[in-house]
Amino acid sequence: MLVAWNVCVAGDEMSDSALNNISHISKQLAHAALKTVDELYPSCGMRAANPDTEINRVWRNLHTASQHSLFNR
């Protein structure tokens, strides 16, 4: 990923292959994050249901983002 960042900083154009690879890895990471928070959430008990807690905020944010069409292609 650092290589991709360096390409962008240099103002160079990213290859389609590199963009597809970054997209694929990003989707995998998003799905892994959602799965992980879904596995942790029940272990947090009733406190996790409180909207002021970090786990609740993370759970809500990840579930909201997971509905985005970019992650469902």
Image (cartoon, rainbow, N blue to C red):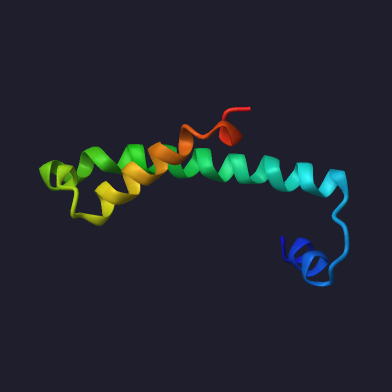
The quadrant of the image that shows the C terminus is: top right
- For the point 33% across and 38% down, the residue is 39
Left or right placement of residue 42 versus residue 20 in this view: left
- For the point 62% across and 46% down, the residue is 26
- For the point 85% across and 55% down, the residue is 14
The quadrant of the image that shows the N terminus is: bottom right
Q: Name the quadrant containing residue 12.
A: bottom right
Left or right placement of residue 70 versus residue 31 in this view: right
The number of discs equals: 0
* x and y percentages locating residue 34 in the rendered image: 43, 40
* x and y percentages locating residue 40 in the rendered image: 30, 43
* x and y percentages locating residue 46 in the rendered image: 11, 42
- For the point 47% across and 36% down, the residue is 66
Left or right placement of residue 10 versus residue 45 in this view: right
The residue furthest left is 46
